[in-house]
Amino acid sequence: MLETAKPLGTSMSHGRELPLAVMVRQLDWILLIGIAALVGYGLWAVAGVTAHDVPGQPHYYLAKQELYVGVGAVLFFVAAALSPELYRRHWRLLYVVAILTLVLVPLIGVAKRGSRRWLQIGSFQFQPSEFAKLLVLLALAGFMAERGRALRDRSTVFGVLILVSIPTALVFAQPDFGTALVYAAITAAVLLIAGTRWSHMAVLAGVALIGSALVLWIMPALGVQVLKKYQNDRLTGFIHPSYNPQGATYNVAQSKVALGAGGLHGRGELGSTQTTLGFLPENHTDFIFASIGEQHGFVGTSILLGLYLFVVWRGLRVLVNARDGYQAVVVGGIVAMLVFQVFVNVGMTMGIAPITGIPLPLVSVGGSSLFANLAAFGVLIGMQMRGERSRRGLR
Amino acid sequence: MPEIPGHGSFIPGDSRTREPWHINQQTILRVGILGAIAIALFAFLAIRLWALQVISGNEYLKIAQDNQIRTVRLQAPRGSILDRYGRVLVDNRLSQSVLVWYAELPSEGDRPTRYTVLSNLARVLGIPTRKLIREVEQRKTDPLSPVVAEQDVNRWQSDYILERSNQFPGVEIAPRYVRTYPHSPLTSLSQILGYVGIANEEQLKSDSTGQIAPNDIVGQSGVEAAFDSYLRGQPGLASQRIDAQGRPRSDLIPNPEPQPGDTVSLTIDAKLQWAAQKALKDGIQTARNSQCNGCWNADGGAIVALDVNSGAVLAMATSPTYPASVFSGRVTTSKLARWGLTAATQVEKNYPAIDRATSGLYPPGSTFKPVTAIAAMQAGVLDPTQNLHCTGAMWVNGKKYSNWDPNANSMINLPTALAISCDTYFYQLGRAIYSLPQTSGEPIQFWAKQFGLGQSTKIEIGDQAGLVPTKVWQKSHYTASQDRTWKPGDSLNLAIGQGNLLVTPLQMTRLYAAIATGKLVYPHLLYSIKRDGKVVDAGVSPAPTTINPGALFNERLQAIRQGLDLATHDPLGTSTPVFGTFPIPIAGKTGTAEKYSQQYKRMFSQAWWCGYGPEINPKIAVCAVIENGGHGGVAAAPAARAVFQAYFHIKNSSYQAVTNSD
C-alpha cells in the first residue's frame, strides 16, 4: 500500500504540511538575506548604470525595476507559501502550461531584434521562456517523483529527455539558444541529483558533445545551417574574438573594455564612459555585469559573485536537508539554473562564453527574468522551510 | 538500516507510517559534485575577472578613453596677403557652412521624419532635395564625418536654421574661414594671388611635412600655393567627448590652439597694379579702336613692371581675367563657367585662367632685336658703328624677306637700326651669324639664354620656360628631314624674334631690366613674411647675376641702350610719338610679332612694347603685350607709358601726351 499508488491530485489532508509557525521558525534567514542582498545589489547597480540611459529621466529604469521587484516579491512569497506537494502532483498541468505559452509565442508573440520571445498582455510584455525554465524543472522533478522506483532505469532517462526536448525545441525556434542551453543545464542537474547511473550520464555527456560539434562545426562544414548565421557567430565568436570587431563580437569587445577599464575600484558613475556614452550595448540588461564592472571595479564584481556563491552554498544546504527526493531534485535544479545562468552571462561579458542573451539573475533589468527567478527562489525558500528539523545537525 | 519500504524512493511517505526520506551517501556525493562545479565555475570567473580588471585594467582603460574622445582639427585663420605698402589684398572672413551629421538625423518613426528635415533644409538652402538626400545617404557608412550641405550660406539662411534647431536635428551651422578680397576690382591679380581649396589626393600624397590632413584648406595656385606653408598656419587640435553614435557630449577643448598663418607681403604695389590693369584694358580698347588689320580680335594681353635692380615684381596684370572671389566660399560650376574657368567655357572667354604675364607664350618680334645685336657683336660679326644697308626687302636662297617698311633705303648703324626697327638690318646679322663656322656655336640662342629666355625665371608662382629654338631642338622636334635641318631662313627669322621663338612677358621684362643694368635679376613676388609682427626668414631670391663682365661688353650694351633711347626720342623712333615728350627719359622698343591663329587660320600681329626708365640710374622695366593688337607703337606703347606715368607720379596735365601715333 504505497502512497505512490494513489492517484495524483488527492487532497493534502494527510497533514504533512507543517504548521506555519514551525515553518517560520525553521526559515533560513541567512538564505533569505542572501537573496534580498542580491536583489538590493541589483537595484543599486541599476540605479548607477542606467542613470544616463534616458535623458532627463535618471530613474527611468530604476523605477521600472523597483516595480518588478515589488511584484516579484509577491510571487516569491506566494511560491514559498504553496505546498510543494501541490506542484508535485500537478506537474503535468505545469508542463502543459509551459508548452502552451511557448507555443503561443511564435503565433501571437512580439518580435524584438529579430527574435520572437515576448507575449504581450495588456501593456506588459513577458517572456514565457523565463517562466518555462522553472515550470519545466518542476515538471521534470514531478516526473522523476512518479518514477520513484525506476529512477535508475534507462526508460526514466529517456522520459526526461523527451519531456525536456519539446520546450527546448520551442525556445530554440524563437530563436533563443541561451534558454535552450539553460534547459540542458537543468536536465543535467535533475539527472545528477535524482541518481541517474553514471554510465547513462557519461553517454548523455558524450551525445551532447557530439551534438554541439555537429551543430556548430560539422553540419555547417557540410553546408547545412542548423543555427542562423548570427547565432553561429555569437556562439563561436568567443573562440576567435578578433574575427569581426564590428559584427557579432562588437558587444563583447566593448564589454571587455568596460570591465577592464573599471580596474580594481571602478570608474564611478560619472566616469564610466563605456556605459554612459552608449559604447556598451544592452548595458542594463544582458551586459549589466560589464557596466557594474566598469562603475564599481573588481571590488564590485567580486562582491556580486560572492553573493551568488553565498546563495548557492545556502541552496545546496537546502538540498541536503530536503524533505524528500522530489524537493532535493527541484532545489538542485534551481541551484544549477542559477550557477549556469550566472556563469554564462558573466562569462559572456568577459568573452569566455558564447553570446546567448541570458540575463544576469536578479540583477538585469527585466520583469520576466526577475519574476521567474524570484518565483524559483520562493520555491527554494518554501522547500527550505519544510525541510527536516532533524538534519539541523548537518549544518 | 532496516528495510523500509520507500527508502531511497522519491515519494515522501506518510509521516505517520513511514520514516522520512533520508539522504544517502550517493546523493551526498552528487550534491558535492554540484557544489564543486559551482565553486570551480565561480573561481574561474573570479580569476578571469582579476586578470581583466586588475592586471590588464590600464590597457583597457586607455582603449575606453580613446573610445570616447574625438580629436577635431581646428582650422587656423589663413595668413593675409598684403602689397609692399601693407595694403590688404587677401584676407579672411567667417562664413557659415551647413553640415549634416548622419548619425543625428531622425531615425525610423521619429518626428519630424528624416525626409521632412532634409527637404526643409534643401528648400532653405535652395538646393535640390534629391541631391541632398543622395549625398546624405552616401555618408551612411561613415557617420562620424559630416556632409557639407552648403558652404557660405547667407545670414538669413543660418539664422533660419539656428532659430528652428528642433526642426533640424542633425543639421549644424559651422563657422569657417573663407578668403575675401578687399581690393575686389583688382581682378588682374587673381591669377597671381591664386586660390585655396580642400587638399586633393595628390597634395596629400606629396606633402612631406605631414601637416596636411584630409579636408584641410591649402593653396591651390598662385601665391596661395607658393607660400602655402607660411600662409596656412598650424591647425589646432581640439578634443571632444563623444558617445557611441559620435554625438558630441562636451565642448571642444582646444589643445593646442591653432596658430594663425603668417602675413605675406608681396612686392606688388597695388596702386601701380591698378594702373597696369587700367592701362591694359585701355590698351586693348585702343587697339580695337585703331582698326588695324586684325585688331578687331584684340582680346587679351599682359603688362609686367619689374624693379630693374632687385627683380621685384611691382605690377603684373593679365587680361582677360576673373574676380578672385569666384573661388572663395561657395564654388559652383555655373559661377566658374560664367568666368570662363571651366573646360567648356574657357575658349569662348579666351582662357582667363592663364596668367599671361608669366605663362603666356608669344613670339617677341622686334623686342628681341637687342639680343640679336649683342650676339652679333659678341660673335664678332658686327661693329656698332658700322653702317649696313637697310632696304625694303632682302632675298636669301631665293626667298624674299621683307622689312616692315618696304620703302626703307638708307645706310644705318646699330642704334638707328634699333630706333627704326629695320628688319633687313637684322636679317643681315642673322645671315652673318648663320655663316659662322660650326665652332662658333649658336650666338643668338646663347645670348638669348644669357638674358634668361627659354628658361623659367624661377618666380615663386611658377611660369613657362618658353622656347629658344636651337639646331638640336629643331632636329628632335620635327620629323620631316627638310624641317629638321637648321636653314639660313631660321637664323633670319630668329634674328627678328620670329620663327619658333616663344617668350613670356615676364621674361622680356627681365631681359630689358638686364639691358638697363647689365645684370640679370630674378623676378620675385615675395616682399616679406611676418609672423606675430616679426619678420620670418623665408629665404631671399638669388641676387642679380652680372652678365659677362668686361669693358667691351658694357660698351656694346651701351650701343643697345643708345638705340633704345633713339627708338623713343629720335624723330624716326618707333615709339617717339608716345615717349618723346615724356618728362622722364624712357628707353624702349616696339615689337609687332606675327603669330598664327589656329582659330582663324591667319596671322595676327601681337603688339609689344618693352623698355625701362629713367635712362640714367634705371629703376623700372615695363613690358606690355596686346594680343592681336597690331603695331606695338599703337596700343602697347601707350599702355606701358601709363604704367611709367603711375610709377613716376606724373599727372596727365604736366606733359603733352601724344596718344595717337598713327
Image (cartoon, rainbow, N blue to C red):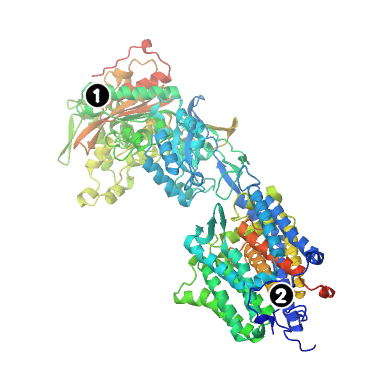
Q: How many marks?
A: 2
A164 lies above or below B601:
below
Q: Residues within 10 Å of mark 2 (few under 14, many from 20)?
A: many
**In the picture, residue A6 is in which quadrant?**
bottom right
Residue extending farthest to the bottom is B3
Q: Give the residue displayed 40% in from the left and 37% down from the top.
A: B122
Residue ID for mark 1? B288
> Percent x, y for residue A255?
62, 59
The residues bearing labels 1 and 2 have C-alpha atoms spaced at a distance of 114 Å
Q: Secondary structure at mark 2?
A: helix
Q: Give the chain letter at badge 2.
A: A
B235 lies above or below B513:
below
Q: Amino acid at mark 2?
A: Ala
> Percent x, y for residue B40?
72, 73
Residue ID for mark 2? A328
The residue lying toward the viewer, choosing from B415 and B63, is: B63
The residue lying toward the viewer, choosing from B149 and B507, is: B149
- Mark nearest the camera among 1 and 2 is 2
